[in-house]
Image (cartoon, rainbow, N blue to C red):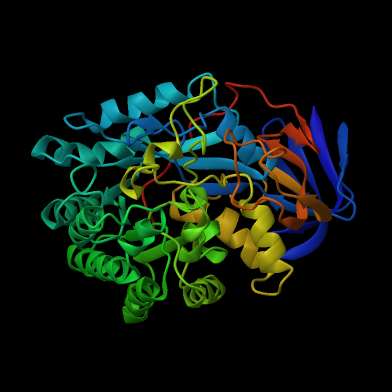
Amino acid sequence: MSTLIKGGTVVTASDTFAADVLIEGEQIVAVGQGLSGNTVIDASGAYVIPGGIDVHTHLDMPFGGTVSSDDFFTGQRAAAFGGTTMHIDFAIQPRGATLRETLDIWHAKARDKAVIDYGFHVAITDLPDSVLEEMPRCIEYGATSMKLFMAYKGALQVDDMTLFRAMQQAAQHRLLIMVHAENGDAIDVLIREAVAAGQLAPRYHALTRPPELEAEATARAVRLAEVAGAPLYVVHLTNAGALEAVRLARARGKAGQIFAETCTQYFFFTRDDLAREGFEGAKWVCSPPFRSPYDQEALWQGVADNSLQVVSTDHCPFWFQGGIEGRPAGKELGRESFAKIPNGCPGIEERMMLLYTYGVRAGRISLNRWVELCCTNPARLFGCYPRKGTLTPGADADVVVWDPEARRILSAATLHQRTDYTLYEGWEITGAPRVVLSRGRVIVEGDTWTGEAGAGRFVHRRPFAP
């Protein structure tokens, strides 16, 4: 049986043209005019784009005495309603665990729940010689990217020796190193001083993690990667100083080695949001924190000039009012001190709609650049292109029929993420998915969900290629 997406405008990272898309089984078999199929999806007046890929998510993740509120069913369903048909989550290594054991823990979380395709990065927190020697086996495991934390002292942070050794190993085996770049040692001092001084409100989360400490750590990671000869991907970059470090490295001839992403929320909020009345600012507590309007403009420029290659979400939702009605604990854990607020925000569903509305329609990025940032570059950088991230014969039929004139009001009451708030409550967007297909199966049609738990598959990703 075949499916024909008919009468739309196909948009890829490089081209925009009128064409039909023919799907047989799970794959695209033709893109062109005059095609026919058994089932027809009307795409008139709409764009036909590759499904979005979010390469930075945290589903069912233990953190700070609780767990993120979306699991692999609810989080992926929300992603699909927003036009995302694949994501890559972080499998965080428990102390003493091998990388294989770490991945097995996260595979179990996804099993029987996944509704779209997914991959895993391995977040390394413990690197004895045995784990260092195991790193090349991650090619066999299909998880060819490793994240190391330069922050969260005493919990996830590694020292520079550990980071550099991992980079050296990655350089030899075409593994992509990812870093959370903040100076965790200096941040730990600032947090301790703030707490001792009784400065406990949510706004002190941002004040104790200043942008200079992200910029310093980014520059340090870039230089270490250059010495090691390793490819580097800086996650959730938030400010002009950190962006400068990446831009300078790429200008030094490292454009095939040094990469960075930002996240949707950093375009729209500032540290002032953490100072909202009462405890409301806790909703905006994430790391790195929100910055200034100047930094927002720098990020828009970064995605426009390719200094930033990807926009992801760092989707890490917690209940604002947790610990009731069967909910795990949430942001309320930090009512007495910002240092105990679970770090993270929801956003997996809103990403592509917000970037279309405030990026494409506002003239900040082109339609093709939107597809490149949200779909194609993620697939290229993380070893699953052209199977994912494009519309071409032989690719998986992860396809979104995008209605450019659809209007919606974003609200926690109507979004599908399992949390009791969205940062974008009441925001109006223009442009949203009409139909979403995952490997040829319609899983979203308007407001209707037709996906199935367990239908999503693990994507075995290839080693990094410059």
Front-most of 39 and 330? Answer: 330
User: Which of the 4 quarters of the picture holds residue 182?
Assistant: bottom left
On the question of residue 263 being in view, the answer is no
Q: Is residue 309 left or right of residue 219?
A: right
- Quadrant of the drawing holding the C terminus: bottom left
Identify the residue at image location x=52%, y=71%. 296
In this rendering, the answer to whether 248 lies above or below 25 is below
On the question of residue 299 being in view, the answer is yes
Q: x, y (%) of residue 87?
A: 52, 42
Q: x, y (%) of residue 138?
A: 30, 38
Identify the residue at image location x=72%, y=62%. 357
Q: x, y (%) of residue 265?
A: 54, 58
Q: Is residue 53 left or right of residue 342?
A: right
Identify the residue at image location x=31%, y=55%. 179
Q: Is residue 432 left or right of residue 90?
A: right
Q: How many badges with numbers are in the image?
A: 0
In this rendering, the answer to whether 23 lies above or below 402 is above
Q: Is residue 82 left or right of residue 454?
A: right
Front-most of 209 and 155? Answer: 209
- Quadrant of the drawing holding the N terminus: top right
Front-most of 117 and 159? Answer: 159
Q: x, y (%) of residue 443?
A: 72, 32
User: Which of the 4 quarters of the picture holds residue 264?
Assistant: bottom right
In this rendering, the answer to whether 369 lies above or below 194 is below
